[in-house]
């Protein structure tokens, strides 16, 4: 239907149009289109365009609309009302199934193919051209829907990665806020390994694993974005890269800190094992001597030699650790005096 606003027919116009329609002039369908769009049927006293067609022209609903639609499509294709040769309704009606802006393109394409093949333009050719347009349009819509779905999936994945990185950032901030253990001074006394040493070590390993996973996922997302030509998300990719670099820097700080503790911790562990081994040996010896009666002179000599060795060991331990204890005691006394 024409998009232009049309004035309704007057009674005289309606009667003249009705007269021309009944004379079967070759512009009948254009007159019916005018009768329909300008409501000439209303001026003649009928309730509808269909009512007018049935009672005045003996035309059924399908036929009267077929003629009016053919006139409308003919005008859209550029045919004039005054031309002697007009396209038939069977050629025009198939175009009713496509949008107005596509009808002329489909008609011209079907006409061009018929001329190239030196064949007659038939209603079947028009119908085939319409079906080809529908198929191509459906394929385009399907591709568009698939692309939109891919974009939505990529955005969901990117959002999930962003939330994961934010969670990692919060974990790192929490780990950074924990107080670092004081450096261990072995000369004062044997101290145990810092209570949070293993926890920090495990956290660093976890961060490295998550960082590796994040790198792999980030590379996959970047490749997917390139293939899909989603340059619009470059800003988010840059943000991910910056956060990745921040994670690498913080993980490196934890690794360096663990490395600084490793030498002292290993030294403490070695000394602890040596003293524990000696303590256990003395405890075992004391347990054995509980019910021991000397009967072998050679064994007695060896036992006394062992006792002398332990005296030497006692003197060595006191030489190493007694000055450190005296220094610490003197420091405490001076502090109290002050």
Image (cartoon, rainbow, N blue to C red):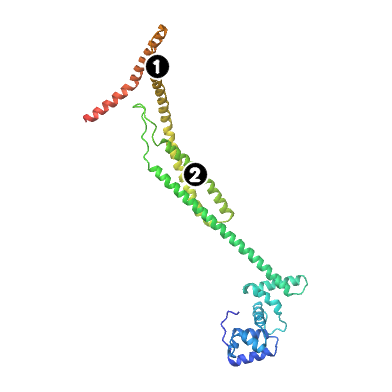
Residue 52 x, y percent position in the rendering: 62, 87
Question: In the picture, residue 83 is in which quadrant?
Answer: bottom right
Q: How far is mark 2 from mark 1, CA to CA?
A: 57 Å
Question: In the picture, residue 87 is in which quadrant?
Answer: bottom right
For marks 2 and 1, give the one nearer the viewer: 1
Of residues 275 and 26, the one drawn nearer to the viewer in this rendering: 275
**Which residue sits at x=52%, y=53%?**
157
**Which residue sits at x=51%, y=52%?**
237
Q: Residues within 10 Å of mark 1 (few under 14, many from 20)?
A: few
Q: Which residue is mark 2?
A: 211
Residue 80 x, y percent position in the rendering: 67, 82
Of residues 277 and 138, the one drawn nearer to the viewer in this rendering: 277
Q: Which residue is mark 1?
A: 288
177 relative position to 152: left or right:
left
Residue 247 x, y percent position in the rendering: 46, 44
225 relative position to 134: left or right:
left
Residue furthest to the front: 291
Q: Residues within 10 Å of mark 2 (few under 14, many from 20)?
A: some
Of residues 6 and 15, the one drawn nearer to the viewer in this rendering: 15
**Which residue sits at x=60%, y=93%?**
12
Q: Is residue 131 above or below residue 252?
A: below
Considering only order in the chain, which callout, 1 or 2, is on the residue closer to the N terminus?
Answer: 2
């Amino acid at each position: 239907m024409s998009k232009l606003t049309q004035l309704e027919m007057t009674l005289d116009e309606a009667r003249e149009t009705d007269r021309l329609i009944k004379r079967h002039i070759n512009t009948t369908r254009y007159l019916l289109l005018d009768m329909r769009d300008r409501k000439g049927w209303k001026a003649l006293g009928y309730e509808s365009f269909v009512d007018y067609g049935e009672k005045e022209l003996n035309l059924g609903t399908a036929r009267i609309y077929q003629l009016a639609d053919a006139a409308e499509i003919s005008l859209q294709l550029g045919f004039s009302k005054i031309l002697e040769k007009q396209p038939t309704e069977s050629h025009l009606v198939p175009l009713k199934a496509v949008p107005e802006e596509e009808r002329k393109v489909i008609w011209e394409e079907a006409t061009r193919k018929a001329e190239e093949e030196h064949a007659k333009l038939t209603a079947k050719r028009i119908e085939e051209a319409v079906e080809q347009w529908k198929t191509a349009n459906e394929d385009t819509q399907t591709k568009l829907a698939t692309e939109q779905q891919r974009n939505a999936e990529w955005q969901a994945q990117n959002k999930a990665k962003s939330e994961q990185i934010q969670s990692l950032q919060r974990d790192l901030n929490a780990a950074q806020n924990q107080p670092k253990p004081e450096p261990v001074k072995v000369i004062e006394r044997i101290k145990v390994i810092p209570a949070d040493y293993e926890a920090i070590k495990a956290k660093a390993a976890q961060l490295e694993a998550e960082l590796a996973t994040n790198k792999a996922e980030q590379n996959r997302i970047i490749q997917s974005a390139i293939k899909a030509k989603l340059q619009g998300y470059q800003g988010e990719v840059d943000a991910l890269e910056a956060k990745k670099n921040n994670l690498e820097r913080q993980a490196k700080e934890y690794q360096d800190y663990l490395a600084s503790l490793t030498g002292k911790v290993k030294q403490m562990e070695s000394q602890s094992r040596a003293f524990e081994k000696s303590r256990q040996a003395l405890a075992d010896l004391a347990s054995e001597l509980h019910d021991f009666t000397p009967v072998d002179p050679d064994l007695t000599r060896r036992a006394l030699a062992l006792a002398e060795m332990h005296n030497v060991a006692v003197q060595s331990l006191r030489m190493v650790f007694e000055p450190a204890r005296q220094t610490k005691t003197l420091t405490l006394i001076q502090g109290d005096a002050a």
